[in-house]
Structures are given as C-alpha cells and as structure tokens.
Image (cartoon, grey):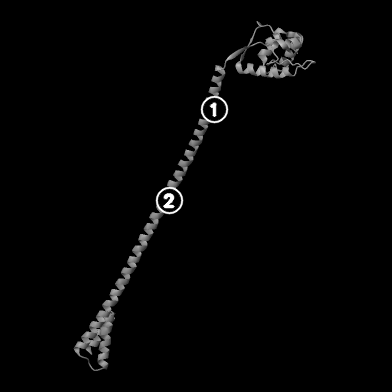
Amino acid sequence: MSFTVLDVATFIKEPSLANAAFVVVDIVTLATPLPSAGAVRAAVKGVELLNEAHKAAEIASTAKHAVDAVHVVETGTKAVEGARAIEEAARVTEGGAHVVEAGSHTVEAGAHTAEAARAGEEGSQASKTVRRERTHEHHSDPKFMGGEPKQPTTTLAESEHQQLHKELNEFLKQQKSEFGHDMAPRRGNPGSKIRQNFTRDELLRAAGEFYNKNAARFPKAAEDFFRQHPHLRE
C-alpha cells in the first residue's frame, strides 16, 4: 500500500507514462493477487521502453521538420540565386541590344560615308574627263556652205563640236530645193554639189536660222557666226 501512495505522489509531481504505469500496476496489484516480482519488473521495463520509443518518435519527427526546413531554406536560396542570374542576364541582354543598335548606326553611317566617297570619286572622274577631253576648232560659217577657210574659228570641246554638227546636219536635211536637193553634207552630196544646188545667200540664211534657234545650246559658235554676219541675227 505504501508503494501505491509513493507512486501516486511521484506521478503528481512528475507526470509521465512511466509514473502512470507504476500507479496502474499498484492499483492492479491491490485489486488482484500479487504477481511475481519478475512480472512486475517486466511490466515496468515495458512501460519504460514504450516511453523511450515515444520520445524517440518525437525526436525523429522534430528532426524531420528540421530537415524539411533546411530544404525549404536551400530551395529559397536557389530561387534567389536564380532570380539574380535572370536579372543579370537581362542587364547583359539590354547592354547587348544597345551594342547592336550602336553597331547598326555605325554601319549606316559607314554606308553614307561610302556613298559620299563614291559620289566624290565619280565627280572627280567626270571632272578629269572634262579636263582631258580634246578640243576642236569649229568653223561657225561652214566651209562646205561657202564659208571662208581662214575665218576665225571657235574652240569647242570635242563632244560639243560633234553634237553641233549632228544637229546642224539634221536641220539641213530639211532644207530642200524645188528639185528635192537638201543642204546636208554626206557621201553623194559633198559641199561642191551643195554649193551648186543652192546660192550663197540661201545657205547663209539656213545657217543663220539654225544659230538663232540654237544660240542657247551653242552660244560660242552662234556668237562667232553672227560676228561675221550680224545682219542675220534675230
């Protein structure tokens, strides 16, 4: 009986499964025939083992929660590192975009520079061509029309001289006699034949008409012609 009182007092002071087991054993012992000492010790030992197993389970559960917490922390750390990596990549990408844009402007400026260089080169070549072009001495009063062989000549660039004679010949083909002869010189219609088919006045009037119509295109040749024949200027 004294053991029962002592066990109850101990349980009240320190409530635990072991102390509760002692109290239960004491009560059962009082109500039933006393078991052997070995059986009592075995029962107490079993209760202690149950208590230790319960504590071990609690510790294991606490450890599991701690491990889970560590995993959560590690996952959060990796997420933060990933976010920082994405932010850094975004900055690098933005910087690359600026570099590409600057490169595009540089290429565009280079294209304009190259175009300007080509234009300058073409202009230089054209200028050199003009400077190198040969000149001809033009008889503003054509010799085949009866013009004086020793008349003052007009210095013209070769291309201008050729263009003048081309247009003059086209004009003279339209100047025809009543017999269908024209004033344009060519094979089969040399100057001697032209002078036979037309009078000197007819030929001068035709030349004067041409220069009056084309004075703006061939100003130097027209001026020299009218200097010799001022009465034909309109």
Tell me: residue 35, above or below residue 198. Answer: below
Residue 122 position in % (x across, y down): 54, 25
Residue 158 quadrant: top right
Identity of the residue drawn at 35% across and 64% down = 69
Q: How many marks?
A: 2
Q: Residue at x 49, y 36 (%)?
A: 107
| Residue designated by label 2 | 87
Residue 8 is at least partly visible in this image: no
- Which residue is situated farthest in the left direction here? 37
- The amino acid beneath tag 2 is Glu
Give the residue at x 35% y 63%.
71
Tell me the SS state at disc 2.
Answer: helix
Closer to the camera in the image, 206 or 112: 206
Identify residue type, mark 1: Ala
Q: Nearer the viewer, mark 2 or mark 1?
A: 1
Q: Quadrant of the N terminus?
A: bottom left
Q: Is residue 111 among what the camera can see?
A: yes
Residue 49 drawn at (x, y percent): 25, 79
Quick one: SS at disc 1?
helix
Residue 62: percent from left, percent from top:
32, 70
Q: Between residues 112 and 220, which one lies in front from this camera angle?
A: 220
**Residue receiving disc 1:** 119
Q: CA distance from mark 2 to mark 1?
A: 48 Å
| Residue 132 appears left or right of 10 | right
> Please, which residue is most extreme toward the top here?
150
Among the 4 quarters of the image, the one containing residue 12: bottom left
Asked where in the image residue 80 lies, by quadrant, the reply is bottom left
In the rendered image, the quadrant that contains the C terminus is: top right
In the depicted structure, whether residue 69 falls above or below residue 96 = below
Q: Nearer the viewer, residue 10 or 210?
A: 210
Which comes before the other along the chain, label 2 or label 1? Answer: 2
Relative to 19, 203 lies left or right: right
